[in-house]
Amino acid sequence: MDLTTLTIREAHEGLKNGDFTSVDLTKAYLKKIKDFDGELNAFLSVTEKLALEQAIRVDERIALSGVEGHDFSMLCGIPCAIKDAIMVEGEKCTAGSKILENYVAPYDATVIKKLKEQGAIILGKTNTDEFTMGSSTENSAFGVTKNPHDKTRVAGGSSGGSAAAVAANMACYTLGSDTGGSIRQPASLCGVVGLCPTYGAVSRYGLIAHASSLDQIGPFAKNIEDAKIVFDSIKGKDSMDATSAELNLESLNAKPYNLKAMRIGVPKEYFSEGVEPEVEKIIKSVIKKAEDAGAEIVGISLPSTEFALACYYVIDPSEISANLARFDGIKYGLSGPAENLLEVYLKSRGKGLGAEVKRRIMLGTYCLSSGYYDAYYKKAQEVRQLIREDFAKAFDLPAGGVDLLFCPVSPFPAFKIGEKINGPLSMYLADIYTIPTKLAGLPGLSLPVGKIGELPVGLQIIGNHFEENKILAIASELEKMLS
Ligand code: GLN
């Protein structure tokens, strides 16, 4: 039996029944990585020693639970991988950048602390666009991640490594981060489930910052149930992240959600000319199936959508220019002899940061400069408010609104490596359907619903703030219908 094809629940049952141990599972995944990652480049580092140590310890815990007759947590003994922008104590954390090539994380991110407490096994750190800026991992300083479905194509980004690792069974589940689409878009392109939680639902402590008002950690998984297990394990308020919040789970769980009782909004702006006809066809056929299953389908409009990309590319670089000011290259090996401190910065940042990161730092610095602040940054914040209001109106159920929105994740399936790398604007368009929700802080999920040839296509399910359970329940119903 190939242990790496099991879901979290299946692996958990196997561990419980003593069919195999966590060490067996871990070794099976490490072998997969050894055999396949040379070509795919989903991993920036493999933490073999840590993984095997963790697995040995966990097997003792599992054996003891058998003797003492109590259960162990669902993630206990299950191997995962972590985007290289999330800190795992004692392991390298490069964020895909040369400037952090020798940086070793001094502490665990809150999500890692939570996973470790549950007995998770960490196999390694996955590839990402530099500082999570990009949609293809081509901006990684350590090479592109290839799409397991077609190795001439990208895996998406920025969490391309995390998506590809799950798609190629090199990890049972992974964590990624989503600032403008970086979980949902690679999940869609690699044919796995990806959940971007509500802003604040999961602590950002220990995630290397891209744009702090947008960044969010979330899971990639083989199916909806696994995504829910991981999300439930990492969510919740954290005193180390003032923007984190507690979900009111009692009330969410109390309601059984099903398609029959759902009003599903289909925003017309998400089916514009840019979307490839084959993608549109697949998404529309799923919407039809949902309707046949009893959902009420409502055509709606989110009129400010057309401004979202422009708004994002003012706010995002502005926050980047502040967040990335701290990287001077001095501590982690990039600085050389220089005449003065300014020259140190110029040399080490010049060498250590890639073109896209530099572009955004310059854009952001410009937008925040005193002469242009009102014209760009302030204006973008006003537009962000309009986008929030569009969604608030759409989800206002008592006023005739809808429960969820269905739309594409990406206007196109996985594109060829190199196809968009020289045109930043065409790369930015990859996130045209994932960016608006982030500006409003909403949760969104990518569910694999079809293929164009070998290339997967994801349906995006968007919910109101903290309605992850509604999204997951409906996604699970659709997943069963489509299987
Ligand atoms: N592709 C978008 C960007 O480059 C989103 C990236 C992300 O979500 N981290 O900003």
Image: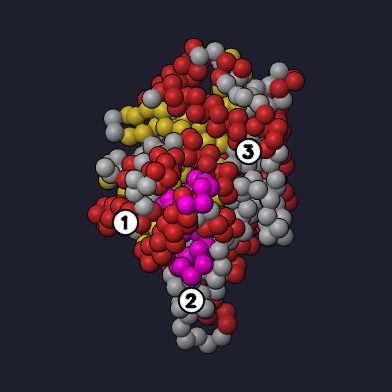
Front residue (pair 455, 426): 455
Q: Is residue 390 above or below residue 73?
A: above
Q: Which residue is mark 2?
A: 332
Front residue (pair 110, 303): 110
Q: Is residue 99 left or right of residue 201?
A: left
Magenta: predominant secondary structure element?
loop
Quarter of the figure that contains the C terminus:
top left
The magenta stretch spans which residues? 67-94
Q: Which residue is mark 1?
A: 27
Label 2 neighbourhood size at 10 Å, few (<14), some (14-19), many (20+)?
some
**Residue with the most extreme left position:** 35
Quarter of the figure that contains the N terminus:
top left
What's the residue type where badge 3 is placed? Leu
Separation of marks 3 and 1 at Cα, in angstroms: 38 Å
x then y, percent, for residue 261: 61, 17
What's the residue type where badge 1 is placed? Lys
Label 2: element kind: loop
Front residue (pair 384, 115): 115
Residue at 63% x, 62% y: name it.
Answer: 322
The answer to whether marks 3 and 2 mark residues whose Cβ atoms lie closer than 8 Å is no
Q: Is mark 1 within 8 Å of ligand 1?
A: no
Q: Is residue 460 magenta?
A: no
Residue at 52% x, 78% y: name it.
Answer: 331
x then y, percent, for residue 248: 71, 39
Label 3 neighbourhood size at 10 Å, few (<14), some (14-19), many (20+)?
many
Q: Which residue is mark 3?
A: 442
Residue at 61% x, 47% y: name it.
Answer: 235
